[in-house]
Image: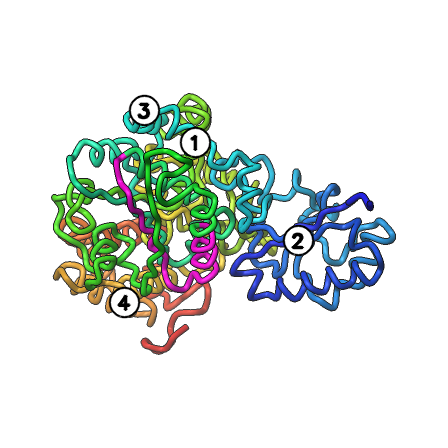
């Protein structure tokens, strides 16, 4: 019997599939077989490796060498050099811009020095294999909860852990579960919110693609804790691979007795169903999501009552984000004190970010709460590409805040960002260099909110249109100082009077853009100057 001397992990996610990952995998297997070393080199599909924008990505162990932009025609040379001659193929290696050395797992920006809880299996195991998930301590948390803990004990450990919602609001997860548990009802529900509709945000998609059984386990634990027998995972329809993997994970878990009736031979039963969203951003708001689940138009409900008391079908309902739930199995298995050793006192644990824009290493990371923005951009993101200077970062997605250079040392957690009127939001960090135009960027954001407004309330319906009209004037190298003031005033009224978080969120990007880059707005109408040379085009023409 041949001894496997190397393992090739090929990232299979939505991005790499579009780049041709399956064709590369097939070519690699065929070439290894042709050379008679297919028994010595194992080819394994895994989830997202966290590296974005590098086409088909793979890592070879035990060397820990990363390859990117691999195409089927590269495979014969790759096999010849790496697996026959024993030397990495330099032209395909993912390299640091500053150092020409081989990038290995301990050195590459997107994977170094990360405390991984949510992503610990992503890029390590085959996400479609329940056996590999079980071998990685999978379902240990569920087993412990059902056979060693009462529902109140599970809620207590989640409360004591300090876990807060990772969807943006930061509400204490254990408290939400406790509210639902204490309300008597013949039916209760658990909903996983995977409707990720914010531009630049894709962390939840990669979590689902990389570790679907983790979400199955987490939702089942939540069901046990609050007394629910049914769960729904609401995934936007464009996330085909996430949907396919979740459906397969649900069915396989049922086959193994880990989901469905009498789980693990106990008296506890719980089932999960996947529901597809139609792509409305507003359905990321929990009550609009519930309306959509019920077959209605996805618009927000009046609160109170909140979903914990009257949610799906007017029954007590827990709604948690994907990343929030992904923490649950390890918290239950290891305990609250274990979780609290990471992050800060008021914001324990880790946070998953997507780093985008003008950085050397775009992709997915998980770091402790409280990690400074500078470290995220320059250590994990590798700094600004093409030798340009940092200008700002849009932190928290489209509904987040523009943070200028003076904010680079802010600690990224709920409490510290609150002091600076910023938010963690969706976890997206869009980095811009010195050539970026803030007016153009804000125009894109405001057009997005105008398009996604459900129109239910006047402040949001009219306010977004008015803001787009004003920003278009600046984009046409017109406008005035009064327009700047009016944008702030309109966004403030929307913040105070809009029906739901969509209209309320516009204030943050508007005010932060003007706070740090007011001179840039003035230059547009006074000097007729746009740093990116993007403005001055005819309004209405897509850029």
Structural distance between the alpha carbons of marks 3 and 4: 45 Å
**Near-viewer residue (185 or 471):** 185
Task: Answer whether residue 419 is visible to the viewer in this image.
Answer: no
Left or right, residue 464 beside residue 13: left
Q: Which mark is residue 451?
A: 4
Q: Badge 2 is on which residue? A: 58
Q: Secondary structure at mark 2?
A: strand
- Front tag of 3 and 2: 3
Q: Earlier in the sequence, mark 2 or mark 1?
A: 2
Residue at coordinates 80% horizontally, 63% vertically from top-left? 76
Q: Badge 1 is on which residue? A: 143
- Front tag of 4 and 2: 2
The vertical placement of 511 against 111, above or below, is below
Structural distance between the alpha carbons of marks 3 and 2: 42 Å
Left or right, residue 398 beside residue 329: left
The percent position of residue 52, horizontal first and vertical second, equals 56, 55
């Amino acid at each position: 019997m041949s001894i496997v001397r190397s393992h090739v992990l090929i990232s299979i996610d939505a991005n790499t599939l579009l780049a041709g990952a399956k064709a590369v995998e097939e070519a690699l297997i065929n070439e290894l077989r042709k050379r008679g070393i297919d028994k010595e080199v194992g080819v394994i599909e895994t989830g997202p490796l966290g590296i974005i924008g590098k086409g088909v990505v793979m890592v070879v162990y035990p060397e820990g060498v990363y390859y990117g932009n691999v195409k089927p025609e590269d495979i014969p040379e790759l096999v010849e050099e790496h697996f026959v001659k024993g030397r990495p193929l330099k032209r395909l290696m993912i390299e640091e811009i500053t150092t020409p050395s081989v990038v290995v797992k301990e050195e590459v920006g997107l994977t170094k020095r990360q405390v991984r809880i949510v992503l610990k299996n992503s890029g390590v195991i085959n996400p479609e294999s329940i056996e590999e998930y079980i071998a990685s301590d999978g379902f240990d948390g569920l087993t412990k909860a059902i056979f060693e803990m009462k529902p109140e004990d599970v809620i207590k450990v989640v409360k004591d852990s300090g876990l807060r919602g990772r969807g943006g609001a930061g509400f204490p997860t254990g408290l939400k579960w406790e509210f639902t548990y204490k309300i008597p009802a013949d039916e209760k529900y658990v909903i996983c919110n995977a409707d990720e509709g914010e531009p630049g945000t894709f962390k939840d998609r990669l979590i689902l693609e990389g570790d679907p059984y983790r979400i199955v386990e987490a939702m089942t634990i939540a069901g046990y804790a609050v007394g629910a027998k049914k769960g729904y995972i609401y995934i936007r329809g464009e996330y085909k691979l996430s949907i396919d993997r979740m459906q397969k994970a649900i069915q396989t878990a049922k086959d193994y007795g880990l989901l469905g009736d009498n789980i693990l031979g106990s008296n506890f039963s719980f089932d999960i169903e996947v529901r597809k969203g139609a792509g409305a951003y507003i359905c990321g708001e929990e009550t609009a999501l519930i309306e959509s689940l019920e077959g209605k138009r996805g618009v927000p409900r009046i609160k109170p009552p909140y979903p914990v008391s009257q949610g799906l079908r007017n029954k007590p309902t827990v709604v948690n984000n994907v990343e929030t739930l992904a923490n649950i199995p390890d918290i239950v298995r290891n305990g609250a004190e274990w979780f609290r050793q990471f992050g800060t006192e008021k914001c324990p644990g880790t946070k998953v970010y997507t780093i985008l824009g003008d950085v050397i290493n775009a992709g997915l990371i998980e770091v402790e709460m409280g990690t400074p923005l500078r470290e995220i951009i320059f250590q994990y993101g590798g700094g600004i590409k093409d030798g340009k200077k940092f200008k700002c970062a849009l932190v928290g997605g489209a509904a987040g805040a523009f943070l200028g250079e003076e904010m680079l040392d802010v600690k990224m957690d709920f409490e510290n960002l609150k002091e600076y009127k910023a938010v963690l939001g969706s976890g997206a960090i869009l980095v811009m260099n010195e050539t970026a135009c803030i007016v153009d960027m804000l125009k894109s954001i405001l057009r997005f909110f105008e398009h996604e407004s459900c129109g239910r309330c006047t402040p949001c319906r009219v306010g977004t249109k008015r803001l787009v009209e004003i920003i278009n004037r600046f984009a046409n190298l017109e406008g005035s100082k009064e327009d700047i003031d009016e944008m702030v005033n309109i966004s403030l009224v929307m913040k105070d009077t809009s029906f739901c978080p969509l209209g309320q969120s516009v204030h943050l990007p508007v005010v932060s853009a003007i706070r740090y880059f007011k001179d840039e707005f003035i230059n547009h109408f006074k000097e007729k100057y746009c740093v990116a040379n993007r403005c001055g085009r005819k309004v209405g023409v897509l850029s």
